[in-house]
Image (spheres, helix red, strand yellow):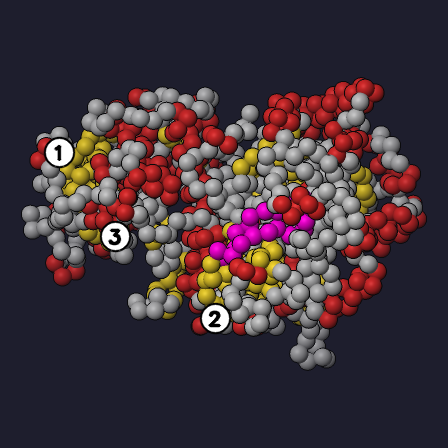
Amino acid sequence: MLLKAQSDRLNIPQRKRDQVPNDFSDSSDFSPSSLKSKGEESSLSLYMEKLNSRSAHQDGERRQGVTDRQRRGQRRDTTTSQDGDIESGEELSSLIPIDSNKHQKQQQKKNKDSNRDVASKETSLFVGRPQSPKKAGTSGQEQEKAKKFKKKNPPKHPEEEKPREGTGVDTPVSRPKSPHATNSPADKSKNKGGRGSKKQVFESYMTSEEVSHGLKRGELIQGQLRINPKKYHEAFIPSPDDTRDIFLDGIVARNRALNGDIVVVQVLPQEQWKVNYTHPSLCKLHVLNFGTNFSELCYYNRVCFSYFTSNRKTRQILNVKVPVSQRPRESTWRKQCRRRQTSPSVVTRMNPSVVYIVEKKHSRAATGFLKFLPEKPFAMFSPMDHRVPRINVPLVDCPEDFSSRPGDYTNTLFICRITNWAADSNFAEGRLAKTLGQAGEIEPETEGILTEYDVDFSEFSDEVLDCLPKNLPWTIPPEEMSKRRDLRKECIFTIDPATARDLDDALSCKQLPDGNFEVGVHIADVSYFVEEGNALDAIASQRATSVYLVQKVIPMLPRLLCEELCSLNPLTDRLTFSVIWKITPEGKILSEWFGRSVIRSCVKLSYDHAQSMIEDPEKMFSAEELPPVDPVHPIDEIHQAVLNLHSIAKNLRAQRFSGGALRLDQLKLSFTLDKETMMPQGCYIYQYRDSNKLVEEFMLLANIATAHHIHRKFPELALLRRHPPPKAKMVDELQELCDQLGIKIDLSSAGTLHKSLNTALGDDKYSSARKEVLTHMCSRPMQMALYFCTGVLKNEQLFKHYALNVPLYTHFTSPIRRYADIIVHRLLASSLSCGPPLGLSTKEVEKQASHCNDKKTMSKRVQELSSELFFGVFVKECGPLDSEAMVMGVLDQSFDVLVLRYGVQKRIYCKVSCGSLHLQGTVGKKSELTLLWTPEDLEEPPTEQVISVFTLVEVQLKADNAPMKYSAVLKRPDSNES
């Protein structure tokens, strides 16, 4: 089982970080999968049989004693059922129950009201303040106040109407508590019962023994929790076969777990599932052909839909015995359906919930604002990330004058850490960690991002710095020189971004008398300076990666190594690990050599320099046009080497893609900064050119070669990188959508997808924009590439890298900024008998691989947030900004666009943009919106604008009132375009 004991964890800080589920930061990560065909659920049907057999077994147990479920009490879900939009991961809208049963109506209203924001002006529940059962809910007067308040303060966007994290209420339960469920002394006193005891909000966690047994029996499911950042009451974990998602509806179902946590989920037995009725027009419809087996209809997903003409026929076809009390009146049912011109559907909810947190990956830290609460011994901390609950903070943690002058801190950012979240409280408890500064300023905002994602940006300790060479300037010891291949006289150079300081790879290319080439990739030998097991190695393994922000880099290693001793700076002797091939002009490899070496780079070229050489092969470059060059190697020699590398790289690239590789390029925004203030002066979309492709091809070649070498030498210990294929269910959804859009695309393999992307979208001036939109859509089903240890994953078919379409792959070429590469270097050195004996075990390699996966994901998210932060500042300083945009996805009253000028993705809300809105029915997944613009001249007819995927629109980006935030507004179309 995947359940990990606490003692098995890495020796790293307990603060684990918010993790994004995959490499593509879009809302599709948060969409529940929907069933399509019976053939897709073979493994799921087995699980259903287990549930059914378990239910039968428990029936026998009930005669002998009290069952687990009876001890805990039946769970009542209090959040409204929602239907996920497959195309965007966003909801369409709340489903409207059509129940004539009076009791059921009252119960649903009570549930809805109890899920309102309890930290609002109308009602509040606080840790440490006992309440009577009467106050646990919302009274009728308070409900009326809430309605009036909502009318006076309408939310700007539909998402803002949803309850924040930490606002659900559930029935009391009593389950034996695990070591994870710790309470403060105050909580213990509150839970003793009596007049002042509080109603329990969350279920107590199972014990580790219960979880272990449940996982072994297949009654529980373990996975990583993903919370929708835009709809934070929606959460998901992958199903055991990883083909679809299990939906957790509401905050109570998450049971205090936060985004990224590894959790264990329980799906209730079939007899406790709930059958509701709803309108297909408000949901994504699927015609299901499951025959008469009801258990096949209601499976992993939160909802499955049956599309028939009457509820009686539905019951007959499905052979479902729905209690009379749960059935709506036939007249009401038909009346509502006629009004909407739709047919009814059955909605089945299995109510999965978190019963255990295996590992708290989330940092439990958040950036946000403080709110003063009169006559309370604590303040309310409101995180900017709504997936994190509101937190009660002791007043002693707050600034001294906060109680007397709370208005002075309205716009001040703080960092707060959660210390406890009791089962009987809607709010967590925490302590303030730091005052950051004013919201809207780049440095405080950046520090908040780094802290939330557990990026260690502190100075390196003296113990770490003591591991560095003392005698500076450092020179290579003669005894080390004698152990290495001396390449200092070869024409070797680096090609990097102009601002790069950590130069960890260099290239060489020498033509041989037989017409072939000797091509070398030379990588900084970081493992020489980072000895296994010392303090420097410990901090490097903990940080695992350098983090690249817009304005700076948070290095994995001290700058003396990153920018000096390890960096392959020009005209300086440096230690390297080299792989050298004898290769034909067509790119066929004839021989290969690995070994430790010494090089002396003759020039530091930027991508722009190399691109100029590629684009102008006949030009004679002067010394003034290039950085300082070693006089031993003429500029013409360097120019020719670049041209030869480019020619070979083109052949290698063509072979890769003809062999079935895939590349999904997405637009990347870059900034020009003021050198003094570091504020954005301009922004542009980064151009990926031939010089970038040249370097990429040889880095890939070196990584693939190294993967084969270390796996051959250490079949049980090699650290490799695999890329699982995309999720089959999401691929099917995408294929169906493309078919309905008339796009001829083949998603059967990585290679066919790559060919489709380059041939399916025409050749007009907007074909590149359509390709970007389609690339984004194709990215959604993709999974993340992962580091792993070959001794742990026994099936070699799982080693494959889907996008590269190669059987083995690893990371070897960036040891200055990636710790995984340092481990690979140690394996390589040991295999060549040119390094110290390995002190690694399979278990240790797998632990570090998992940690590197986490840190790489978080680093990527921090980089994205840094870019968003700077673009928000740019819009505020230079906006409003106008641009063409292309529609990427359509919801019920909003749609997503790719802003072509800046490469950013934004959601446009139609009610904000235009005066009138008409929703046209959807066909399958091809959604359309028809917008009716109120005419400026009332005698003219309204201007009609149809919005669907690939529609070209004009948008304006404008700064919001909130710091660093901006929104996109649809501009009125010209009358001649309508």
Up/down of 437 relative to 734, above or below: below
Horizontal side, residue 196 vs residue 641: left or right: right
Res 830 quadrant in image: top left
Tell me the magenta residue range: 415-433
Horizontal side, residue 956 vs residue 467: left or right: right
Numbered mark located on residue 501 in the image: 3
Q: Quadrant of the C terminus?
A: bottom right
Report how far apart the C-alphas of labels 2 and 3 lie in the structure.
Answer: 31 Å
Q: Residues within 10 Å of mark 1 (few under 14, many from 20)?
A: few
Find out whether residue 422 is within the magenta segment. Answer: yes
Three-letter code for the amino acid on which mark 3 is drawn: Arg
Q: Residues within 10 Å of mark 3 (few under 14, many from 20)?
A: some
Q: Residue at x 54, y 60 (%)?
A: 396
- Residue receiving disc 1: 480
Observer-nearest of 174 and 449: 174
> Which of marks 1 and 3 precedes in the sequence?
1
- Residue receiving disc 2: 876
Q: Position of residue 359 (x, y in %)?
A: 53, 37
Q: Residue at x 53, y 62 (%)?
A: 398
Report how far apart the C-alphas of labels 2 and 1 lie in the structure.
Answer: 55 Å
> Which of marks 1 and 2 precedes in the sequence?
1
* Mark 3 element type: loop
Q: Residue at x 53, y 70 (%)?
A: 401
